[in-house]
Amino acid sequence: MNPSSLASVAVGRPVRGEFTYVVPEALSGRLTPGQRILVPFGRSMTLGFFLGPAVPPADGSSVKLKPILKVLEDSPSLPADLIALLRFAAEHYRYPLGEVIRSALPPGLSTAQDEKEAKPDVQEFAVALVTEAPEALRRAPAQSAALAYLLAVGGRAPLEEVAHAIPGARETLKKLAARGLVRLEEVVLAPGVREGLGQNRPERLTPEQGAAVEVLHTAVDAGGFQPFLLHGVTGSGKTEVYLRAVERALERGRGSLVLVPEIALTPQLVGRFRSRFGGDVAVLHSALKDRERLFHWQALRKGTVRIAVGVRSAVFAPVADLGLIVVDEEHDPSFKQEDKLRYQARDLAVVRGKQAGAVVVLGSATPSLETLENTRKGRYQKLELKRRVDDRPMPTLQCVDLRQERPKDPLVMQEAPILSPPLLDAMAETIGRGQQVILFLNRRGHSTFLLCEVCGASVKCGDCDVCLTYHRSQNRVVCHYCGEAHSVPEHCRECTGPLLKMGVGTERVEAEVAERVPQARVARLDRDSATSAERLTELLASFARREIDVLVGTQMVAKGHDFPGVTLVCVVMADTSLAIPDFRASERTFHLLTQVAGRAGRGKDPGRVLVQTYNPDAEPVRRMLVHDFDGFAEGELARRKALSWPPYTRMAAVRLEGESPEQTASVARFLGDYLGRHMPPSSWGVRLLGPALAPISRIRGKTRWQLLLKAPTHAALAPLLARLEAKLVDVPSAVRVTIDVDPAAM
Ligand code: ADP
Ligand code: ZN
C-alpha cells in the first residue's frame, strides 16, 4: 500500500496512542496536519485529528484499516508546533493524546462538527475617560464597580470581559458612557493596529533593564530557541522588560505568549499589556465563555491577534509564528495543573519554545530551584535586576521572635499573642501617617482547630483526615478539604469536655485588628471574603483608593499587586508553611515570605516588613530576613542534592484513591510489588518509595495511598511508567489510580 495514503490520527477518546486510517481517493491532497476530521471508531464515529502520513503496519494488517470519513475544516485548528507540544505532553505526562488535544482546544472545536467562525474580527471595547471615579458616582455602586474594574485593568477592556467580571456591566457601561465617563468603541482586530496606545511607556529604562532588554532583543532578532531566567527583585521592573521584548517580536512580525499565574489577582499586569498593545492582545483566563474562547483561538491562529496573555492553559494557545514566550512568576505553584492532564505549564513553555524556535523568558523574584539549577548548568542564561526602579530602597526587614513575646504565666495558654506589641506599634504609626498595612497569614477562618481541654482530642471531619476550621462569620465549623460545613459542636465527642478554639486564621486576625487598633479601617481578602470576581475587584479597588487602612489576607495578598500606599507588611506567622510534609516546604516558605514582603514600599515612601515567627533560625526565615535569596538557594540545593530530591532527581507519584480502605491498600501493595519486580537495572538509579498512606490519608471518605518513584533522569523513569500504565487494566475500577509526573506536592 502506498504510504502516503495512510494517515496517523489521534482520536478524541480516552484511549492511548495514535491510530492508522486510510486516506480515501477523494481526500488525497486535501489533508494538512492539525486538521479536525471525522473517523469511524469502534461502532461509532468520532472526532479525530490528522497528525501526518503513517507507515503501513509491519504485520501487513493494513487491509483491515478504516477510512477517514470527512475533513471538518480547511485550515487546521492545530498549528504544527502545537501538535508537537501536545504529542510531547501526552507522552511525558502519560495521558491519552486525543484527550490532551481535546482539552487544549476551545469547546467549539472539540466536537465532531464543521468549524464555525466565531464572529467577525471586531471587538467592542470600553475605554475610561477619567483616571478616577468622580464623587458623584458614590451613590451608584454598580457603575462605580464597573469603572473601578476598567481602571484596574489599564483603562480599557473588551465589554465582554467587564461583563464577565461584573454581571450586568453591559448596561452599566452604557450608563457610564451617557455620563461621559466611558467611551464605547469597536476595534477591528488586525496586526499592527495600536490606535496610538502605549502612553504609559517609560522614556528611559533603568541601566539593568536596558541591559536585559538588549540581550532579549538580540535573541528575538536571531529568531531561534533561547531560554532565559529573568531574576529581578520585587519592584525592579520585570514587566517593562517583558513588554519591550514583546514589542520587538511584534516588530519582527512574530507572536508572543505571556503566561501569568492568576489574572483575577493581577489585573494591573493585564492592563499594562492592553494599554501598550490594545487589540493585539487576547486575554485568556479560566472563566471565558465558550464563544470568547473560540474567538480568541481563531484570531490567534490566523494571526489577526498576535499576543496571548493567559493562565497556565494558555500554554496551548495557537499563537501564529510564535517568537517569544514569557512566564511571569515562574516559581508559582499554580502553573501545575492538579487534575486530568497533570502538566506543568512552565515546563511545557520551555518545550514549546524549543519546538517553535522561540525565545523563552522565565521571570521571578524568587526563581524555582529547578530553573535555578538549569541556569547553573548553563542551559538557561541568567539576566538580573538587582535594584528597584528609581533606586527605591528594598523594604527593611525585621523579625519578631514570638518565643520572647509569650506571656510569662504558662497557664494562660490561649493568650499567646496574635499581634505582638512591636507589630501593634508599627501598625498604629503607619496608619497615623496615612499609609497602609498588609497583614499576611496563610490560614482562612477564625480558629484552625477545636481542642478538648480535658482529653486533648481535636474535632475532625467525618470524611477527611483533617481538623475542622471554625468560621465565626458563618458560626460553623468547615472542612477545608471537602468543604462540608457543620454546626459548632459544644462538647468533645470523646469525653464531653469543653472545647478550646485554637490556631489562628485570617478571620481572627481581622477581629483582633478591629479590637486592638480601633482607628483602623480593616478588611479581609481570602477565598471566604472574595466570593466572586466582582467582590474581589471591589476589595482591591477599594484598597487602591485607600478606603481601607489594613488588609488582612492569605496568599491572595502576596501576588503581584502594586499598591503605592502600602509601607508596612506584617507576616502574622511565618511558621505555617514550614511544617507541611513536603520536601518543598522551605522553598515555598521563602517564596511566600519574599513575595508578600515585596508588596511594601513600592510607592515613593520606603517600606518596612515585620515577620512574626517561632522559628527565627529556620533557613528560609533567616535568609529572607537579610534579602539573601542566593544564600538560601545554595543551602537548599545542597540539601536537595544530599537527599536526592528534585532538581537532582526526577519524580513520579502514583496516587490511589478508593472507597474501601482494605481494597485500596491491597491495590497499593499489588502495584508496589509489580513495580518492584520490574525495576530497571540498578545502574539506572530508579528508586521506589512506598506504598504508603498519603500525608492526608482520607479525603471525602476515600482512602488515599501513594507510591513515589525517583530517578536521576526522566528517561530512566519513562519505560517503567509506560509498563505501569499498561498494568492498570488489572486494577479494579473501584480504586482510581493516577500517575502524576513531576509532582508539585507530595
Ligand atoms: P516587578 O514586576 O519587577 O515587581 P514592575 O514591572 O511591576 O516590577 O515595576 C514596578 C513599577 O515601576 C511599576 O509601577 C512600573 O510601571 C514602574 N517602572 C518600571 N520600569 C520603569 C522605568 N524604566 N521607569 C519608570 N518606571 C518604571
Ligand atoms: Zn472533609
Image (cartoon, helix red, strand yellow):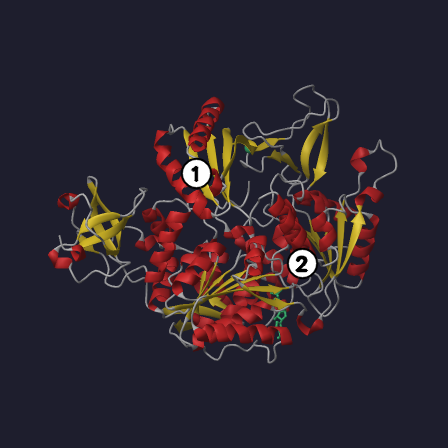
Disc 1 is placed on an element classified as loop
Residue that extends furthest to the left in the rendered view of this protein: 25
Mark 2 burial class by Cα count in 10 Å: few <14, some 14-19, many 20+? few
Front residue of 14/192: it is 14
> How far across and how far down the image is residue 709, in percent?
49, 39
Figure check: 482 above or below 162: above
Query: Which quarter of the figure has residue 675?
Result: top left
Q: Is residue 117 left or right of residue 441?
A: left
Q: Which quadrant, please, contains the C terminus?
A: top right
Front residue of 557/347: it is 347
Ligand 1 sits in quadrant: bottom right
Q: Is residue 239 left or right of residue 49?
A: right
- The residue tagged 2 is 630
Residue 184 appearing in the image: no
> How far across and how far down the image is residue 373, in percent?
57, 56
Residue at x 62% of width, y 63% of height: 138
Query: Which quarter of the figure has residue 117?
Result: bottom left
Mark 1 burial class by Cα count in 10 Å: few <14, some 14-19, many 20+? some
Callout 1: CB less than 8 Å from ligand 2: no
Disc 2 is placed on an element classified as helix
- The residue tagged 1 is 680
Residue 172 appearing in the image: yes
Front residue of 319/456: it is 319
Q: Is residue 400 left or right of residue 31?
A: right
Q: Is residue 250 left or right of residue 3?
A: right
Give the Cα separation between the discs numbered 1 and 2.
Answer: 37 Å
Specify the amino acid type for callout 1: Pro
> How far across and how far down the image is residue 147, in percent?
55, 65
Q: Which mark is residue 313?
A: none
